Image (cartoon, helix red, strand yellow):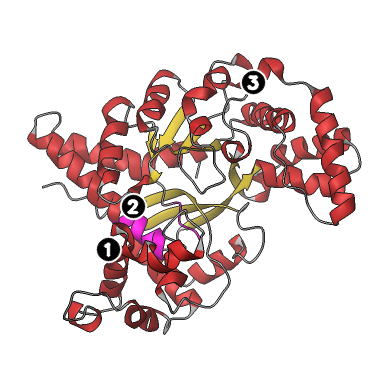
Amino acid sequence: MLDITDIAAVDHHCHLPLDEAPPLRAAGLARFFTEASIPEVLETQTPHSLFFRRAVRDIATVLGLSTEDYVDSRGNLQFETVLAKRAEYSADDWFRLMLEKANLDALFADMGYPRSGGWTVEKAQKAAGSMDNPPLIRSILRIERIFEDLILEYDTFDQAEEVFRETIRQARQHGAVGLKSIIAYRCGLDIEPEKTSKYHASQAFQKYKSETYRTGTYARIADKALLDYVVLAALEEAAKQELPVQFHTGFGDTDVDLVKANPAYMKPIFENPALRKAPIVLLHCYPYIQEASYVAAMYPQVFMDFSLSSPLVAFGGGRAIEEALGLAPSTKVLYASDAWGVPDIIYLGSLHSRKVLTGVLNRWISDGWMDEREARQVALNVLQLNSKSLYQG
């Protein structure tokens, strides 16, 4: 049977932990295992979701607890028992343990979320530094976050645009390995290069600039004319240096318009000759796994991952991986955990993605689609080599 636990993975998309006390109640941990944010859901519903309950069991195993320690006679999980044991670790020690268990070669963190209260790359590097083989930790710059900050700082659109483009030109010099856009959350992936104009983007800029004068803080940009222009500008600069650009696609929290989060909307971007050298990485993709795998198979610069669907969709993550690799070449599919808030998901994402990927590949070996050597190469591509090649990590 194929065993891929020894392959050191590259987690090409995640978020660093929040700088806060460890959760001691189920709802406190549950908020990191769902896209929901309504307190009632976190208190009474998420603790009964399949993946959250499995996650607590996996964490308990790492902590050395037996099922008798945290499962009562009626089969109820005693979440507080597990969380109290977990809280005995310092934040740095728990982060290191999760990295070790995840078996990572590198970790690339989206620094655009949260806006405040999260670890810096430097803090993560320092915490990991005492490991025998610390993973490479680098940043991903969020396009919308950069421009929102520039609206706050500069008075004219021309000034903000020039600094924005220069920021992207210097991204690698400052330790970033790629960019990310959340335009799917703001107005959808139906970016329209032929309809985008600097005039309309500038008008929207002035509207948001006025808002910052009133509030004294940044404005959350959601104007399609401005966002289309900014994302296209980012892609233009990224293409000049072949800098990867990640796009949130598919499901997310309640802000996202799921219909317009379909990566098939991005066809005009994929087919724009001026942008062809900007590698595009489609994140998450669920429930649009088929659409994502199709465009990844059709366009040389398009890649995809299955983060969030594995492990959040539990056993459905296996179907997502199988659909992705059923059409897209194994050189176009990447691994990521999309961990946020707590480092636990860095480990759990690795654990369960390896489990479901192993299950898929063993079925394919059994059915004669490939032999074990080929299957291991597929796993190596997905877990490590594709990201190393793409991000030049």
Per the model, the C-alpha gap separating discs 2 and 3 is: 33 Å
When the figure is inspected, residue 274 is found, relative to residue 66, above or below; the finding is above
Comparing 329 with 215, the one in front is 215
300 left or right of 350? right
Q: Which residues are magenta?
A: 338-351
SS of the residue at dot 2?
A: helix
Disc nearer the start of the sequence (2/1): 1
What residue is pinned by disc 3?
Answer: 192
Label 1 near label 2: C-beta < 8 Å?
Answer: yes
What residue is pinned by disc 2?
Answer: 311
Instruction: Specify the label residue 54 is tagged with.
Output: 1
Disc nearer the start of the sequence (3/1): 1
Q: Is residue 92 visible?
A: yes
Comparing 179 with 169, the one in front is 179
Three-letter amino acid code of the residue under disc 2: Pro
SS of the residue at dot 3?
A: loop
Residue found at x 70% / y 17%? 195
55 left or right of 154? left
Three-letter amino acid code of the residue under disc 3: Glu
Quadrant of res 125: bottom right
Residue 345, position in %: x, y? 40, 60
Three-letter amino acid code of the residue under disc 1: Arg
Label 2 CA crowd tier, 10 Å (few <14, some 14–19, many 20+): many
SS of the residue at dot 1?
A: helix
Comparing 285 with 150, the one in front is 285
